[in-house]
Amino acid sequence: MPKRAIEMRPAQIQNLKPKHNRRPTVYCVGGVTGLNIQVQPSGNKSWIMRIRIGGKRHEIGLGAYPDTGLAAAREKARELRDKVANGSNPVAERQAAKVQVVKEQARSITFNDAAKRFLLWKSEEFSNAKHAEQWRATLATYASPALGKMLVRDIDVRDVQRALEPIWLTKTETASRLRGRIEGVLAWATVAGYRTGDNPARWGGNLDAVMPKPSKVAKGDNQPAVPLELMPAWFAALRKREGLAAKALEFLTLCASRSGEVRGMHWDEVDLKAGLWTIPAARMKAGREHRVPLSAAAVKVLEGLERRGDSPFVFPAERGGQLSDMSLSAVMRRMNEAEPGRWLDRVSKRPAVPHGLRSTFRDWAAEKTEFPRDMAEIALAHNVGSEVERSYRRGDMAEKRRLMMEEWAKFCLCNK
């Protein structure tokens, strides 16, 4: 019969010292067969339970001393012995628990990390780098503050609603895009095994029950436009302003183009003799080449410009590169400040901005002319018809649109 160890008292445990300089010293504590305390050369102590399970000897840690005191260590040791006596295997259970923790960690990913991996996976679908950047910027600006640090498996409808609500009524179009992009990230996370269940960003039968329909709320993010009846007066005021940004804004107006298309315009995209500006697909929002027939007034703007050194840009910035988006906005802001309350959007009553000039052009084409709707939409580089219809349409009505752009220029200049 093995010799029974003498039961140590708390004071004795506290005063135990290591006997070796390079390896731990193990003391038998007594009170429960197999319970020991291990003292490191540094003096740190921890509890060890030596026990046979299935014929094999195991050492099981019961915690560090003094966080786990003598009485607690003996209680843990008794519980282990009782489990083994009842047929359990604490070692196997601990190993299984560790494996489960590792699996849970592998299945845990934050929304920010999921968004990065989703965009990397989806990058091949984007028509151009600008489109991909729009996705990243929207998610980073509006989704990340509310969802970024959350595990995707924990995100529910209330969390998605919390991300959308701040801009749902004021930037409805942006919010609607954001919802779809959040839905895409969470759909990827589900397929990748990081979450289960329904997609909380789904609209139908889900968010539509707790949020107003985008079509029913005020279109607060429509870009403020110059009212159609004020356009000639506004254009006359613009032409009195000096500076390259004002010239760029004048050209943008005559072509009904986007700010980025004009600011990034290269001289080699322009054929002044033919009166044609060809914007490459890489610079277009839709990812397709877009031809702009130039009115005589637009050609005159370009002919009045001086080329700056080796810069390829038609409207270069002072320090090189293209003009910033703020440069064109600043011209309109100064025009609004010069005549407060005059150049206000008819609906929102907000000061007009560069992108809103495209809406003014669209209103002019619809209300003041007989030009076909599709022609105006093509001039704005919008998608016209279904994907199938677009695949069969080879022409872009460039020569027919030339007449429309001449008429638009005459309308803008009729206040001379």
Image (tube, rainbow, N blue to C red):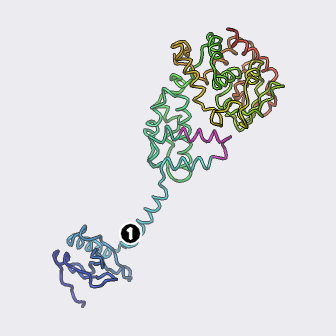
Q: Residues within 10 Å of mark 1 (few under 14, many from 20)?
A: few
Q: Residue 63, how many percent across, how many down?
A: 29, 70
Type of amino acid under label 1: Arg
Is 388 placed above or below 6 here?
Answer: above
Residues in magenta, as a range:
123-138
- Residue 4, given in percent of the width and then of the height, sits at 21, 86
Residue 159 at x, y = what percent?
A: 44, 40
134 falls in the magenta region: yes
Task: Specify the farthest residue to the front.
Answer: 309
Instruction: From the viewer's perspective, tell me whether residue 170 is left or right of residue 389.
Output: left
- Which of the two residues, 323 or 121, is positioned nearer the viewer here? 323
Identify the residue at horizontal 17%, vertical 74% (top origin). Answer: 10
Q: Which of the two residues, 371 or 108, is positioned nearer the viewer here?
A: 371
- Answer above or below: position of 7 versus 165: below
Q: Residue furthest bottom?
A: 1
The residue depicted at 83 percent of the width and 25 percent of the height is 274
Q: Secondary structure at mark 1?
A: helix
Q: Where does label 1 land, which residue?
A: 94
